[in-house]
Amino acid sequence: MSSRGSLPNNAEIEQALGEHHQLFGGDSHTDLLRSAREAALSAMQMLSTFEPRLVGPVLNGTADANSAVNLHVFSDQPETVAVQLDSMAISYKPYERRLRRNRDVTETYAGFEFHHQSADVQATVFPVDGIRQAPLSPIDGKPMQRADAARVKGLIDEGGAAQEP
């Protein structure tokens, strides 16, 4: 017997959350998701030098009013992201995030949190070659789903609430 007993795993929780939003969220959840994705797209355009990718709840459709827009950006020197934010007069707060690169290796990445278009944005900085392999998702242990700006724009244009992996 597992030490978890009969508790659901992260993937089951994520699925239930998506179903909850579909059943009870209605137009308000669709509007919230659209607004968050529009903020994500705008932030991605602003940080286009760093080839940003959207990840997490805003991408997969499980975001709520407290969810941040999570971006992966790519630079071998994280401070260049800070310099660009400074040059645009954007106030930010640095942070560090620990993510699993594979089953046995966890790495720490620098990041910058800022407010943009009524959304909190968290931009985690990966090395340039990190664009080829996403870290493992804490939800299902598979590589995180990432979306470039064109895909995010497509999601906005479709207006759908959920994103299929």
Image (cartoon, rainbow, N blue to C red):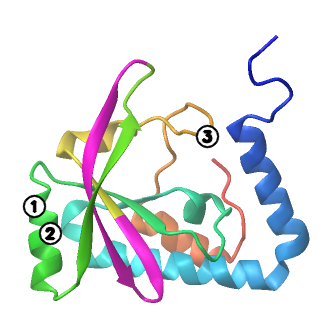
In the rendered structure, which segment of residues is drawn in magenta? 104-122
Q: Amino acid at mark 2?
A: Ala
Q: Viewer-proximal residue, 104 or 33?
A: 104
- The reply to whether dot 1 and dot 2 touch (C-beta < 8 Å) is yes
**Type of secondary structure dominating the magenta stretch:** strand
Mark 1 lies on residue: 79
Mark 3 lies on residue: 139
Compared to 141, does 42 lie above or below? Answer: below
Mark 2 lies on residue: 82
Q: Which numbered disc, 3 or 2, marks the residue that appears first in the sequence?
A: 2
Compared to 13, does 161 lie above or below? Answer: below
Q: Position of residue 117 (x, y in %)?
A: 43, 89
Label 3 neighbourhood size at 10 Å, few (<14), some (14-19), many (20+)?
A: some
Going 67% across and 63% down the picture, which residue do you hit? 61
Q: Answer with left or right where residue 82 lies relative to residue 4.
A: left
Q: Amino acid at mark 3?
A: Ile
Q: Residue furthest right?
A: 23
Going 84% across and 58% down the picture, which residue do you hit? 19
Q: Amino acid at mark 1?
A: Glu
Of the numbered discs in the image, which one, if any, rests on residue 48?
none
Q: Viewer-proximal residue, 115 or 144?
A: 115
